[in-house]
Image (tube, helix red, strand yellow):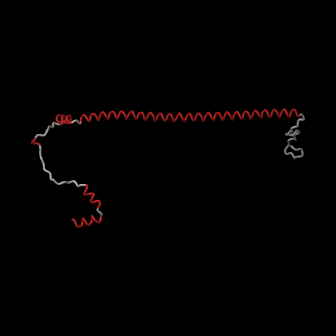
């Protein structure tokens, strides 16, 4: 507080100022000692910072390696799941093929003419035809099938020629 300034209120002025200036030491040895101590402290701080940086880098590297290994193991587990699904499907396919083969053998053995005849006689009461049961029919000698030669001739004719043929022929 300045001595010449006006003071408000009833409190007395302070005798000692709040700020005390530092006095410079005349001893240079003490100053150099203090500088050395400060440099050592600064060096220690820098070493600690470097160690922290190394420590952080090591932790980051370990995390990256861990994540890579985790991804590889996850991918392998997915591959194993798909492989087991494929094996299950192959096993089902082989059992179905085996059952299909057995059914084909059963069908082939049941399609034997003797087996069919025996089944018809025993289950359905059928027998062979007698001569009086046979009926003969006569068919016209006309051929109802068109030959491919006629069609190819009609296809090669132009539309104008077809029109003329329809008008004059019919």
Residue appearing at x 13%, y 40% in the figure: 129
**Screen quadrant of the N terminus:** top right
**Screen quadrant of the C terminus:** bottom left
Position of 170 with respect to 86 (left or right) is: left
* Front residue (pair 87, 124): 87
* Front residue (pair 99, 123): 99
141 to 81, vertically: above or below: below
Position of 58 with respect to 123 (left or right) is: right
Quarter assignment of residue 90: top left
* Front residue (pair 152, 138): 152
Residue appearing at x 51%, y 36% in the figure: 75
Outermost residue on the left side: it is 132
Quarter assignment of residue 151: bottom left
Position of 3 with respect to 117 (left or right) is: right
Position of 87 with respect to 54 (left or right) is: left
Question: Disc count in the image?
Answer: 0
Residue appearing at x 14%, y 51% in the figure: 139
Residue appearing at x 15%, y 53% in the figure: 141
2 to 159, vertically: above or below: above
Percent across and percent down for residue 127 are 14, 37
Percent across and percent down for residue 16 are 88, 38
Percent across and percent down for residue 126 are 15, 37
Percent across and percent down for residue 111 are 23, 36
């Amino acid at each position: 507080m300045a001595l010449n300034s006006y003071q408000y209120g009833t409190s007395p002025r302070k005798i000692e100022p709040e700020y005390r200036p530092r006095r410079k030491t005349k001893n240079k040895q003490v100053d150099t000692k203090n500088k050395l101590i400060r440099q050592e402290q600064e060096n220690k701080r820098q070493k600690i910072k470097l160690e922290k940086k190394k420590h952080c880098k090591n932790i980051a590297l370990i995390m990256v390696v861990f994540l890579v290994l985790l991804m590889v193991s996850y991918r392998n587990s997915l591959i194993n799941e798909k492989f087991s699904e494929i094996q299950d499907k192959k096993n089902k396919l082989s059992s179905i093929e085996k059952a299909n083969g057995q059914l084909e053998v059963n069908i082939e053995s049941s399609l034997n003419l003797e087996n069919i005849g025996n089944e018809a006689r025993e289950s359905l009461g059928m027998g062979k035809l007698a001569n009086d049961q046979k009926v003969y029919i006569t068919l016209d000698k006309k051929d109802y099938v068109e030959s491919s030669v006629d069609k190819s001739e009609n296809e090669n004719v132009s539309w104008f020629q077809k029109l003329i043929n329809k008008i004059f022929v019919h």
